Amino acid sequence: MNTSRKGRLVVALAVAGATSLALAACSGGPGAGNGGDEGGGDGGDNVVTVYGTIVPPEQELLEESWADWEEENDIDIQYEGSKEFEAQIAVRAQGGTPPDLAIFPQPGLMADMASRDLILPAPQGVADNVAEYWSEDWAGYGTVGDTLYGAPLMASVKGWVWYSPAQFEEYGWEVPTDWQGVLDLTAQAQADLGTSPWCIGFQSDAATGWPGTDWVEDIVLRQSGTEVYDQWIANEIPFTDPQIKSAFEEFGKIALNPDYVNAGFGGIDTIVTTPFGTDPAQAMADGKCALHHQASFFDGFLVDAGAEVGEDGDIWAFLLPPYEAGGEAEGDVVTGGGEIVAAFDDSEATVKVQEFLSSPEWANNRVKLGGVISANKGLDPESASSPILQQAIAILQDDSTTFRFDASDLMPGAVGAGTFFKGMVDYVNGTDLDTVLQQIEAGWPAD
C-alpha cells in the first residue's frame, strides 16, 4: 500500500472482487478510447493524465514535485487521486477510458493488469532508468515474466521500533540485537515503568488490521528467511504452515500480553480501536508510550504531534533486529512498500512523463518537499526532510540490504487486504490462532 499512509488506501474484499470482475470483462488493449498516440484523456498532445491513490494533503506535494518540469517541457500533467483507485482503474480500463499513466500502490494489481494486456511494457528510457537507478529487487516488482512494465516511485522502510533516547538512557536500556532481546527489553521496560510499554493501533477504517500484518511480515522474514517469505507470498507455503504460525505466536508474545499493551489507551481490546498513526504518535510525544512498531512514515505523525525526531531528539528508532544475532545476512533485512508507475498510452508526452518519474531528478524533487523517500539510487539522502528518512534511504541504497516488498501488497487482494487484515483483528480479539490461520488461508482464490 501507499508508502506514506498505508492504511489510508482501502482494498476491501468487495473491492478486490469488483476488480477481478472488471478485469475479466475487459476487452481491448492499452490506450483504447483515450486517444492512443493523441495524448490520452483530453486528447491533447501535451496533456498527460495520471491516476493514483495519493490524495490531499500529499497530492499537493506530488503535483508540486513536477510543476517546474511541466513548464519547462510544455506538458500538462493532470493528476487525479482517489481512494477507490483499486476498483476504478479496472472499470476505466474495461470501459476504454484509462488514464495515460497509473500509480499502482500494489505490484500484484499491476501484474494482474499486465497479464491481461491492459498496460504497456515500459519504454526504453524507463527501462534504462530502472537498470541504472534501481536494485534488482525493485526492478522485479515492476516486472511480469521477463517484461518490465513499470518503474518504482516512492518507498518506505518498515520494521522500525520507535523509542525515547532519553528514556533509554534514564533506565539503562539497550537497543536489542535479536528478537529475544526485544522480548527482554519489553519485560524490563514493563518492570521499570510499572505500566505497559508498547502502544499498538490497528484502526484504519476498512483497512483496519494492516499494522498487524506488518508485524507478522517482519517476523517471517527475520525468523524464516527470504525463501520462505517468497514461497509464502506465492501460497507455496500456506498461512497454516508452522513457520508462519510461529511468526504470529512471536507477535502474540507482545500483543496478547496485557502487561505489555496498550500503552496510553487501555488493554488488549483497544488495539483494534486505536488509530494506527495519530494516536500512537501523540502518546509517544506525551511520554505515555515507550515502544511502537511502525514504518518510516511514522516520522511525519511524530512531527505533527510536536516531537523532534533524531538520535538526540525526543524520539528515535531502531530496526527490528534479526531473529538470531549474527545471522547470515550481510546487511539490514527489511520489509517495505512503494508504488509502481505503468502506462496505458505511449504518446510522446506520456513517455516523457513516465521517464521523468523514474529519474533521480523527480525523486530528489519530491523527497525535498518532505514526508517521503524513494529507493532510487540517484537520490541524495540529504534531500530527505529528517534523519530517520535519510537513514531509510541509505538502507534502501545499500547493496547489502535484503529487501522484500510488503507481503500483503503482493498477495491477491482477497487475502492481502481481505482475510489477512481480518485475521489480525480476530487474533488480537482472542480468536484461536489455528482458526485464524485457516480463515486467512481460505481467502486465496481458487486456481
Image (cartoon, rainbow, N blue to C red):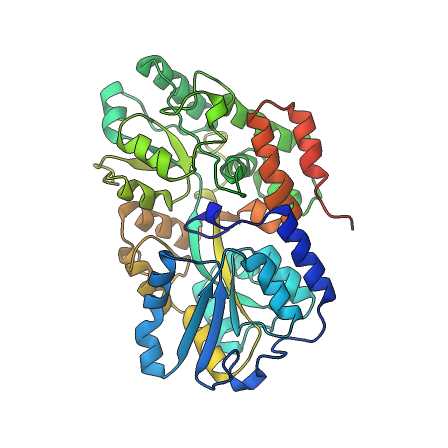
- Of residues 34 and 372, the one drawn nearer to the viewer in this rendering: 34
Residue at 43% x, 22% y is 261
Please say whether residue 115 is visible from this viewpoint.
yes
Residue at 36% x, 54% y is 372
Q: In this view, does 423 lie to the left or right of 307?
A: right
Q: In this view, does 244 lie above or below 303?
A: above
Identify the residue at the far left of this view.
Answer: 312
- Of residues 330 and 271, the one drawn nearer to the viewer in this rendering: 271
Quadrant of res 430: top right
- Of residues 238 and 47, the one drawn nearer to the viewer in this rendering: 47
Q: Please provide percent x and percent y for residue 3.
A: 44, 52
- Of residues 422 and 289, the one drawn nearer to the viewer in this rendering: 422
Q: In this view, does 393 lie to the left or right of 228?
A: left
Q: Please provide percent x and percent y for residue 216.
A: 54, 35
Counting labels gives: 0
Residue at 45% x, 20% y is 267
Residue at 33% x, 49% y is 389
Q: Please provide percent x and percent y for residue 380.
A: 31, 60
Q: In this view, does 426 lie above or below 91?
A: above
Please say whether residue 238 is visible from this viewpoint.
no
Quadrant of res 302: top left
Q: Please provide percent x and percent y for residue 84.
A: 54, 57
Q: Is residue 287 above or below residue 298?
A: above
